[in-house]
Amino acid sequence: MRTTPKPFSLRIYLLIVVAISWPFQIAYVLWANTPFMRYALSSLPMIMVTVATYIAGRYIFRDGFSKAGWSWGKSKHYFAVFSLAIFLWVVPTILELVLGMRSIPRGVIVPEILGNFLLRFIGTLIPAFGEEFGWRGYMLPHLIKQYSLRTALLLQAFIWWGWHLPVLVGMGMTEKLTDNVGVSIAIVLVVSLIPGMMNAIVFAYIWTVTQSLAVVTVYHAAFDEIRDAIASSIGFGLLVNIWQMLTLTILGGLLLWKGNWKHLTARKT
């Protein structure tokens, strides 16, 4: 028997997502003390976004997922997203090494870094899909039907940043940027807001242009795991952080202003 879709409610959708996924984010902040626990407790919240989205789309709103982006994309798309991830993390890391701001620790060799990245990348594909299926494949098309283009894009960007709040608060508590924990948390939240939102704009643009969850999932996994592979081996300093935040802010802003969003706006009808 064919089911009749119900009107989409952003409030209900986010309630389901937060209820299912935030407990794992909080567990990550409290108990991720080993490499395995860090991987498991950072992956599970991402996967839970898909679980929540499936519940919402299948049983609450009953509108399905036929237009979420079920294509593989093109080879040039994968080349482009990998190039972007490399530009964001590898290029500034090389600059730090060349400028003498950082040196490669003794015993660390490039093949080991590449092998570490490959394992991390493969292991992150499913969690990365978990987020992209929910935020870009399901939520964003609903938002574009209810709001103007830029409002919908900024709203999904703010929601994506806000979904990370437990981890961001945890970062502020552990990094101790000042003697006052509250101030440290505030600094992390303020500094991460605009670059985080603009990164979500980049995610949305990749998904829109390629019409492919696969391509945006690969970008998500590459972004996370190139960063983590470098951080756990060579490490990086202030230049890398400034580079990636500034690049994402500029790129996201340009895409928001002048990007070709015709595939997304076509979903209004």
Image: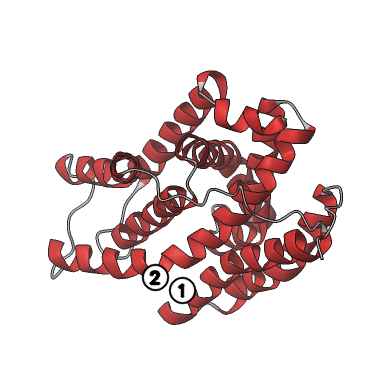
Q: CA distance from mark 2 to mark 1?
A: 9 Å
The N terminus - image quarter:
bottom right
| Residue at numbered disc 2 | 123
Asked if residue 197 can be seen in this view, the reply is yes
In the figure, is residue 204 to the left or right of 104? right
Q: Tell me: residue 214, above or below residue 241.
A: below
Name the residue located 63 percent from the left edge and 29 percent from the top edge: 266
| Residue at numbered disc 1 | 39
Question: Which mark is on residue 217?
Answer: none
In the figure, is residue 146 to the left or right of 254? right
Task: Give the quarter of the image for residue 131.
Answer: bottom right
Front one among 211 and 129: 211
Task: Give the quarter of the image for residue 23.
Answer: bottom right
Asked if residue 180 can be seen in this view, the reply is no
Kindly state the secondary structure of the residue where label 1 is placed.
helix
Front one among 229 and 124: 124
Where residue 59 sits in the image (x, y, percent)?
80, 66
| Labels 2, 1: front one | 2
Where residue 26 sits in the image (x, y, percent)?
66, 70
Kindly state the secondary structure of the residue where label 2 is placed.
helix
Q: How is the image coloured?
A: secondary structure
Front one among 93 and 206: 206
The C terminus - image quarter:
top right
Q: How many other residues sit within 10 Å of disc 2, few (<14), some (14-19) or many (≥20)?
A: some
Name the residue located 21 percent from the left edge and 68 percent from the top edge: 115
Q: Are marks 2 and 1 in contact (CB under 8 Å)?
A: yes
Mark 2 or mark 1: name the one nearer the start of the chain: 1
Q: Kindly identify the amino acid type of the residue bearing the numbered disc 2.
A: Gly
Where residue 176 sits in the image (x, y, percent)?
55, 58
Name the residue located 37 percent from the left edge and 37 percent from the top edge: 243
Q: How many other residues sit within 10 Å of disc 1, few (<14), some (14-19) or many (≥20)?
A: some
